[in-house]
Image: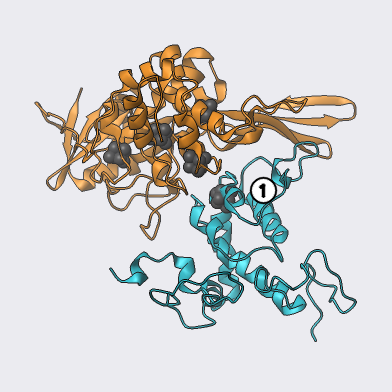
Chain colours: A cyan, B orange
């Protein structure tokens, strides 16, 4: 059976097949990068006209059932009490609906900024098939563009959330001024 | 039971005839791809396929993810409560036998144990049209629960494709009312024998009475630990299960108005049994998975003489780590109460 047929979608555009921070390296049976370097679900998605994007997302967010499986499966979610389970005050609306689900998912993505390693698990498990990797990849891209940080790539680098430099730009959340 | 033999045009006309009074739901979307849940459509152009089981189950129509129970608002010093949402008549097309069979489990609670207004209104207002299933996939095990995937009388109407035509079986008084009102010149057929189940290519047969016996004295079995090892407590299995019915109630308010909601909860979540003082009787993963299995195949049988599972396979198909209830029940069935070695 050709590898392309059984490999997880995420692995097909993996950019990090040859890492150097291992103790032992077993030989690869076969190279698994199947899409051209630099191409991934995000670059493909961003070819879509801006106006066409929200209607599709609105529909996806309607479908989310707030099972929180995307959080549960995430290897980088490690809070002992997740913001989504917090009761008093309740920060994420528990009633389910397009708007509320959008709040939940955007919050989750923001929490994973500088942490998400793009394992693609959240997208794989989501029963409502939300294309979550588009969001996580975008967030990774922003973190890398402005802070030169790719989670997990260099264990010697200071962690994104616990380091500060005077040169850091001030706009992680807000739209940057045109340079 | 009355059966009609209808052409495709007739059957489409029958469901479009009520479009003014009913919201019509179909298991396909405009691109005919896999849908998450039945989707609303203004009109039916062609008959729905018989091989689609939506990811979300039929319970969404009677017991949605979250629903407002009532609204409240404060004006001056007065607090006023009001009905938050009214239910509308709906017609749901293309429901498989497993989903139809699961409704009695919800009814045992929301209808027979307590008369739950929110559930009752929606159930009364919904016409369920079943369809003979033509696609058993690797996770389906309805026949092990004595549900016939090809025919069911648990809904209001049931469709069996026959050659180029369709047999429409009337399976409830509500279904009959619907047909009397909206069917024009239907030709009845005598002697219609419903098809039998497709059968399963299972390598084992589940003996539910035996499984219950093992469960009766099996609270401390070591296998629970083994079953739960890979579970990530995501709750997908319970959210998608047509028979799971646990909910949580809370208020959401902004300024002077808000609503009390009830929304799904899951025994697979660690917070499910956590008490205000912090104690959690089911703090271990194995205890939570055991609760799910015992509730479905033991407690519900003790309380209502019904198995709270219809074999729809959603908990198997959508579990991110391949926890397969069939395999686990099979292990239980053969373990006896003395337990199972690894
Ligand atoms: S896994 Fe999917 S459906 Fe569940 S909460 Fe996350 S986005 Fe929503
Ligand atoms: S879907 Fe699977 S992993 Fe998730 S809670 Fe259920 S059994 Fe556990
Ligand atoms: S326990 Fe699993 S197979 Fe049984 S009704 Fe629920 S989701 Fe379907
Ligand atoms: S206790 Fe668990 S298995 Fe039972 S209905 Fe509730 S969520 Fe489902
Ligand atoms: S469980 Fe049975 S009725 Fe349901 S989709 Fe599978 S085969 Fe069809």
Q: Tag 1, which chain?
A: A
**Badge 1 element:** helix
Q: Answer with left or right where residue B245 lies relative to residue B308.
A: right
Q: Is residue B152 above or below residue A11?
A: above
Q: Position of residue A106 (x, y in %)?
A: 68, 58
Outermost residue, front side: A24
Q: State the residue at coordinates (75%, 73%).
A: A157
Q: Position of residue A35 (x, y in %)?
A: 45, 79
Q: Nearer the viewer, residue B314 or A54?
A: B314
User: Label 1: which residue?
Assistant: A100
Looking at the rendered structure, the number of numbered marks drawn on it comes to 1
Q: Is mark 1 within 8 Å of ligand 1?
A: no
Q: Quadrant of the C terminus of chain B?
A: top left
Q: State the residue at coordinates (31%, 19%).
A: B210
**Counting other residues with Cα less than 10 Å from the Cα at mark 1, is it few (<14), some (14-19), or many (20 or more)?**
some
Q: State the residue at coordinates (34%, 44%).
A: B16
Tell me if residue B60 can be seen: no
Q: Nearer the viewer, residue B96 or B29?
A: B96
Q: Position of residue A77 (x, y in %)?
A: 66, 53
Outermost residue, bottom side: A179
Q: Nearer the viewer, residue B203 or B193?
A: B203
Q: Quadrant of the N terminus of chain B?
A: top left
Quadrant where ligand 3 appears: top left
Q: Is residue A139 above or below residue B119?
A: below
Tell me if residue A45 can be seen: yes
Q: Answer with left or right where residue B30 lies relative to residue A72.
A: left
Q: Position of residue B74 (x, y in %)?
A: 83, 30
Q: Residue B11 occupies which quadrant of the picture? A: top left
């Amino acid at each position: 059976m050709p590898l392309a047929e059984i490999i997880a979608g995420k692995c097909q555009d993996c950019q990090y097949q040859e890492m150097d921070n291992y103790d032992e390296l077993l030989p690869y049976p076969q190279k698994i990068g199947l899409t051209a370097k630099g191409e991934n679900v995000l670059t493909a998605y961003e070819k879509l006209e801006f106006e066409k994007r929200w209607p599709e997302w609105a529909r996806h967010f309607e479908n989310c059932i707030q099972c929180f499986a995307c959080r549960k499966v995430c290897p980088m979610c490690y809070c002992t009490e997740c913001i989504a389970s917090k009761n008093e005050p309740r920060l994420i609306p528990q009633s389910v609906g397009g708007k509320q689900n959008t709040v939940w998912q955007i919050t989750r993505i923001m929490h994973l900024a500088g942490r998400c390693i793009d394992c693609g698990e959240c997208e794989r498990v989501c029963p409502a098939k939300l294309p979550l990797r588009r969001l996580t990849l975008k967030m990774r891209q922003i973190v890398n563009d402005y802070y030169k940080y790719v989670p997990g790539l260099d264990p010697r680098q200071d962690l994104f959330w616990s380091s500060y430099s005077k040169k850091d730009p001030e706009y992680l959340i807000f739209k940057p001024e045109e340079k | 039971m009355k059966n009609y033999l209808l052409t495709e045009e007739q059957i489409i006309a029958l469901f479009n005839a009520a479009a003014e009074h009913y919201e019509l739901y179909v298991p396909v979307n405009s691109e005919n791809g896999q849908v998450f849940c039945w989707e609303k459509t203004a009109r039916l152009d062609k008959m729905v396929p018989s091989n689609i089981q939506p990811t979300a189950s039929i319970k969404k129509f009677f017991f949605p993810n979250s629903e407002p129970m009532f609204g409240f608002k404060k004006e001056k010093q007065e607090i006023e409560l009001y009905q938050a949402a009214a239910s509308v008549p709906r017609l749901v097309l293309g429901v498989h036998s497993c989903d139809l069979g699961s409704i009695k489990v919800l009814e045992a609670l929301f209808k027979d144990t307590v008369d739950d207004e929110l559930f009752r209104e929606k159930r009364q207002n919904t016409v369920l049209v079943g369809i003979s299933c033509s696609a058993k996939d690797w996770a389906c095990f309805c026949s092990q629960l004595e549900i016939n995937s090809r025919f069911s009388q648990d809904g209001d109407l049931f469709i069996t494709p026959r050659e180029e035509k369709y047999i429409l079986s009337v399976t409830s008084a509500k279904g009959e009312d619907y047909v009397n009102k909206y069917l024009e010149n239907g030709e009845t057929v005598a002697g219609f024998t419903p098809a039998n189940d497709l059968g399963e290519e299972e390598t084992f047969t589940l003996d539910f009475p035996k499984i219950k016996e093992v469960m009766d004295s099996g609270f401390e079995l070591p296998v629970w630990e083994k079953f739960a090892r890979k579970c990530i407590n995501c709750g997908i299995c319970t959210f998608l299960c047509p028979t799971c019915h646990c909910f949580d109630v809370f208020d959401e308010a902004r300024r002077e108005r808000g609503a009390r909601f009830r929304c799904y909860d899951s025994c697979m979540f660690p917070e499910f049994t956590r008490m205000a003082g912090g104690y959690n009787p089911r703090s271990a993963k194995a205890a939570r998975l055991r609760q799910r299995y015992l509730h479905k195949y033991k407690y519900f049988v003790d309380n209502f003489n019904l198995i709270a599972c219809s074999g729809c396979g959603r908990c198997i198909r959508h579990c991110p780590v391949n926890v397969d209830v069939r395999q686990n029940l099979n292990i239980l069935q053969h373990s006896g109460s003395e337990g199972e070695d690894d």
